[in-house]
Image (spheres, rainbow, N blue to C red):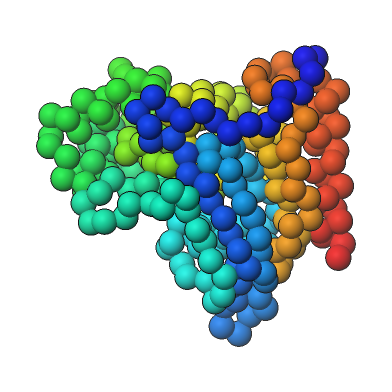
Amino acid sequence: MAPPSPVSPNPPSPDGTGGVRVQLSGLRRSFPGGVPVIEGMDLDLAAGSFVALVGPSGCGKSTLLRLVAGLDRPDAGTVTFSPPLERTRGARNPIAYVFQDAHLLPWRSVLDNVALPLEFADVPAPERHATAHAMLEHVGLGDATARFPAELSGGMRMRVSLARALVTRPRLLLLDEPFAALDELTRNRLDDQLLALWKELGMTVLFVTHSLSEAAYLAERAVVLSRRPARVMLDRPLALPRERLPALRAEPGFAREMGLLLQALERGDAT
Ligand SMILES: Nc1ncnc2c1ncn2[C@@H]1O[C@H](COP(=O)(O)OP(=O)(O)O)[C@@H](O)[C@H]1O
Ligand SMILES: [Mg+2]
């Protein structure tokens, strides 16, 4: 195996959109009548980096993503983006969110599903169709633009969902267990596709998964959370080659990284 390359931010993409740095500081969130979900969380994500967030079910991962996305507000603490994100009305959304369910509109074609965020941003029809078509080609669905969601496999639907998330060239991509419902081969292929998109587009990626092997395969850095309230048990740059190829899954270095993540997960479950 090649020696581990240093973890460095993804270079900015040629059109200068690139990734954004995300800093969480003293973040707290509890829900009425419940125990705290997030109790003083600090995290600093480098611009253009790919970070995996792993933790047991119910520990607060989705809550954390919602706070980062601005879909929920913390009780205390801040989420800061640098450079600051442009979030004016009509602007292309600089933060994209992908869920386990593809959430496609069944009555719209694949092309019109992917073009939807551009429609919201008042992009003229010819431009939005051309942009959506190009993004669909990126995810290998250039031939499926006229099809409807019901005619697609689960993996294809997820690729449409990815294309729709990326069509606005977001500076931050949040993924919440996106491929968890797919079979293992489909999931592995989507992991590779996501890596290729990240390298090309340069956005910052925060990827939530409960699969340790997926976290180790995808990310430059892994953050392992304890059970609720979520605390950071391990925050580590993965000592793996920057180029991730399927054969990596069989390498001893890969098993070692997974072992470290598992130990942290177990410690977080015991305390
Ligand atoms: N809107 C809400 N109201 C009350 N409790 C919530 C709400 N959202 C999440 N929770 C609780 O917060 C905890 C963490 O949830 P979540 O962030 O979805 O966990 P994860 O994504 O890690 O599985 C859970 O116990 C859940 O029941
Ligand atoms: Mg969740």
**Near-viewer residue (103 or 64):** 64
- Is residue 214 visible to the viewer in this orientation of the structure? no
Q: Relative to residue 141, is residue 243 drawn left or right?
A: right
Q: Relative to residue 244, is residue 268 drawn left or right?
A: right
Q: Position of residue 22 (x, y in %)?
A: 53, 51
Please determine whether, in this image, residue 269 is positioned above or below residue 252. below
Please determine whether, in this image, residue 39 is positioned above or below residue 130. below
**Near-viewer residue (51 or 78):** 78
Q: Hey, which residue is sitting farthest bottom in the picture?
A: 33
Q: Relative to residue 226, is residue 130 drawn left or right?
A: left
Count the marks. 0
Q: Hey, which residue is sitting farthest front in the picture?
A: 83
Please determine whether, in this image, residue 108 is positioned above or below residue 187. below
Residue found 85% across the figure and 53% down from its top? 266
Residue found 12% across the figure and 34% down from its top? 125
Quarter in which the N terminus is drawn: top right
Residue found 66% across the figure and 64% down from its top? 41
Quarter in which the C terminus is drawn: bottom right
Q: Relative to residue 3, is residue 103 drawn left or right?
A: left
Residue found 76% across the figure and 23% down from its top? 4
Please determine whether, in this image, residue 224 is positioned above or below residue 129. below
Q: Position of residue 62 (x, y in %)?
A: 56, 58
- Is residue 44 visible to the viewer in this orientation of the structure? yes
Quadrant of the rendered image containing residue 140: top left
Q: Position of residue 56 (x, y in %)?
A: 72, 55
Q: Position of residue 63 (x, y in %)?
A: 56, 63
**Near-viewer residue (52 or 159):** 52
